Image (tube, rainbow, N blue to C red):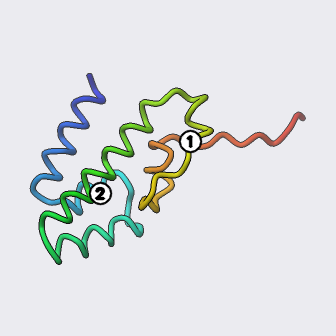
Amino acid sequence: MAGTCSMLCLIIITLFIPPLGVFLISGCGVDFWINVLLTILGYFPGHIHAFYLEYVYYERRNRDPLTRSTQQPAPGVYSDRIQSGGHTKVRNYGTV
């Protein structure tokens, strides 16, 4: 339920201000600035880009951890946070 509520809030925010929705899931990176540029050039391209990034983010967030590690990078997405669905990668430093 909490995931659904946050997703709906993010969609409502993105409907009015697409770069703010992208900022909330990716931070101030390349994806954010691409969305700002697309929104300035045309309001609908900014929406399409923002909803694509949100789709990739939530689709990868809900994946099984075993399949998440073998997934291919999504095309046109430059943020590691979106690529991993908000999950951090666990590093294996060997045995101690």
Measure the alpha-carbon separation of dots 2 and 1. Answer: 22 Å
Q: Residue at x 47, y 30 (%)?
A: 63
Secondary element type, mark 2: helix
Residue plotted at (30% across, 51% down) = 52
Q: Earlier in the sequence, mark 2 or mark 1?
A: 2
Local secondary structure at mark 1: loop
Disc tally is 2
Asked if residue 46 is positioned above or below residue 85 in the image, the reply reads below
Q: Position of residue 15 (x, y in %)?
A: 12, 52
Q: Amino acid at mark 2?
A: Val
Relative to residue 62, is residue 57 depicted above or below?
below
Residue, disc 1: 71
Please provide percent x and percent y for residue 80: 51, 55
The image quadrant that residue 58 belongs to is: top left
> Measured along the vertical axis of the image, is residue 8 above or below residue 54?
above
Position of the N terminus, as image quadrant, is top left
Name the residue carrying label 2.
22
Q: Indicate left or right for 25 with 70 as reference.
A: left
Q: Left or right of 22: which side holds 27?
A: right
Give the residue type at disc 1: Gln
**Of marks 2 and 1, the one in the foreground:** 1
> Which is more toward the observer, 54 or 44?
44
Residue 38 as seen in the image, left or right of residue 17: right
Q: Residue furthest right?
A: 96
* Residue 81 locus on image (x, y percent): 47, 51
